[in-house]
Amino acid sequence: MTEPGATTTNYAGDSAHVGVQAATVHGGVHIYSLPADASPAEKFETGVSLLDGGIPGKARHLIHEAVMGNHIGNKVCFHWQLALVSGRTPHEMPEEDIALLRQAPFMCRVTGGDAWADGVNTVRRLLDSARQPDADLRPLLKDFDGLGDPQRAMILRHLELFLDGPLKDQMWHRALQSAREHQMADDRADRVWKFFEPKPAPPRTRAPRPPEIPVGTWIKAVTATLVFTVAVLHIGYLLARELQAFALLAYLLSIAGGYYAARGGLEWRYRAERRRAKDEEYGLPRARTTSAPSGGFANRVDQRFDYYFAKYVPRDTSRSAWLAETAGIRKSLRDEIVDVYREQRIGVEKINWLIRYRVSDVRRRWENGTLWNYRQELATPLATKVLTILGLAVLAMGATRAVGNAMGVAPVSAGRSATVALMAGVIGALAWLRIVLEHRRHAADEAESTQTLDDCTAAYERWREKLADTPSDPEMAAWLDRDRKVLLDEALRHYGLAMSDMIAYAFIEARGSRARRARVRNGPWRYTRYQLLLFLLTMDGVRQLSVELDFERGTFHGWNRTNYRYEAVAAVRVHQADDDERRFELALVNGEQIQVEVMTSGMEELEMDEAPGVVSEMTLDASGIHHTLHVMEGIAAEGKQWIAQERRRKGERQFAM
């Protein structure tokens, strides 16, 4: 039953391999969304987008509604024809759809000879020729090859399952050639990853803490200053009254010395406190008594910082040294991000760019030797220290001489004023010191925050510019369609089959291991890695191939092949769990179970105004599950008799068309 050298496989879905992965929903992209009062033209355009996105079921419905709303013409007819046949074989079509396919050119009033009319006529001729295996195909194929894009490319993509016989081989050859030529087109390798990046949240920085100056401090400062001024003036008055010129000069010099001492001392104190605060901020953090709840926003920010600091290790630096010496910076940045974004209902995925930038900025400053520059910048200059000390010396000597002379004139009065001046001066100096330091601290914090915000804004704009050419969902679908064709060709060549040798084939697409996922609004999930399951139905039985697709690079990995007879298929079904998990299950008579999780639990994550069930149905429609179920359920029910029944059904449908 199984070919030599191949591995039998029980395909558990991606949930068996990966934990919780972040999902991206491009909520601002509305190519698959319609307002409740949508016009026929809007329904048609959305239907075309769905068709391009590989979601033919919904596309058929909307384009049909547009036509019934009298939105007609050559272009409409062409897309309607393709929507009716896309993703299914003739015997999968209900009778009413076959009738619509025949009547489409008349209902849409196809006229003239533009490119869309040529496309309509070519589709009609291809469908007619599929019923005539002995017809001369050369004129038809010549006309087809003369079609321009996008008509030619769309026919190759959507008519794939509908043709038969020699025409099927000819069209397959053209489709495969186009798929190989364009598999990595449009800078796919450099753009696919951008689809899985969310729209970045703008940068925010923590607002500087405002100056914390109690009212009592202001009262002390003002009151003490007034009292000090009165006391100082009284001592000066005593000296002037007695014409103590030398003492008065010394007194004035002491006041000047006090001014420069206060000015230098203030600068000295500010620099020392600012440097100490920075050292505490960037120093080794205290161990947290409690950790952030697992899975919460803060915990995910922790993980991102840990990841990027471990990844962005500076040149010529060991990871252990880097992580140890930047632990304080890492905690400071982490706390800031958590603080400014926690209440904004922003997922960590939207600020990954910011975390990455902040970490890379730390690495850059480490490498160029500026990470600890604040220690030099905040070091107190020697001139400031000298000025402060000299000012204090002049203050002390001048004040001592002046007060001594004043007490010789009026001992009680001068002594009282000197005592009051000393007490008021100390109280006022301490109060003003706190006030000025708080204002300078706030000004420095604000300047630092503004500079950080400017730098982050520049990085934000660079990141937005980098994401400007994010591929659209239809582009992603087109690349995936080409990958499927390349894989199908690999399978045909492995088994030595031509396309016309196959009775039928079917794909299932599911999320691969360690895959990121993303979607547009109301669109299907797309993945960075796919698990592709291919069934080839031949005269000898079923050829089953499973492979993992690296979607960014367009490469296949982990090939598994299994062969079995038609009679070996015991049951086929799709299991739907309460959490909307959808699992394709194929049971063989020997007890082997083949399972693929097409929709894993939690994937029906809705944006505002998205209807329940829309995302899962879109994903299932795009995955190929409906066609695969139709084929495999027929085999499970009829066994090898399915081949004869299939041929009979094809003949009946071809005659009907």
Image: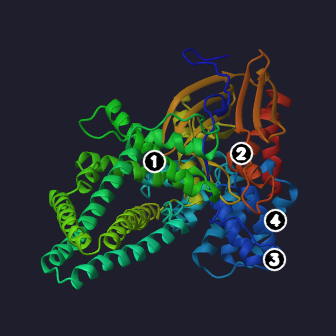
* Residue 90 location (% of width, % of height): 77, 51
Q: How crowded is mark 4: few (under 14 residues within 10 Å), some or many (20 or more)?
A: some
Q: Do the residues labelled 4 and 2 touch (CB within 8 Å)?
A: no
Residue at image x 74%, y 72%? 43
Q: Where is residue 135 in the image (x, y as percent from the top left)?
A: 64, 54
State the separation of the CA atoms marked 2 and 3.
29 Å
How many angstroms separate mark 4 from mark 1 (CA)? 66 Å
Left or right of residue 191, residue 235 in this image:
left
Q: Which of marks 4 and 2 is nearer the N terminus?
A: 4
Q: In which quarter of the image is residue 113?
A: bottom right
> Label 1: few (<14), some or many (≥20) within 10 Å?
some
Whether the residues at callouts 2 and 3 have beta carbons within 8 Å, the answer is no
User: Mark 3 against mark 4, which lies toward the viewer?
Assistant: 3
Residue at position x 57%, y 74% from top?
115
| Cβ atoms at labels 3 and 1 below 8 Å apart | no
Mark 4 and mark 2: span between their CA atoms?
Answer: 35 Å
Q: Mark 2 points at which residue?
A: 603
Q: Name the residue under label 4.
A: 100
Dot 1 lies on which element? helix
Q: Tell me the CA gap for discs 3 and 1.
A: 51 Å
Callout 3: SS: loop
Number of marks: 4
Residue 97, percent from left and from top: 82, 60
Q: What element carries label 4?
A: helix
What residue is disc 1 on? Answer: 332
Q: Name the amino acid, label 1.
A: Ser
Q: Earlier along the polypeptide chain: callout 3 or callout 1?
A: 3
Q: Which residue position holds label 3?
A: 37
Mark closer to the observer (4, 1): 1
Which amino acid type is shown beneath numbered disc 2?
A: Met
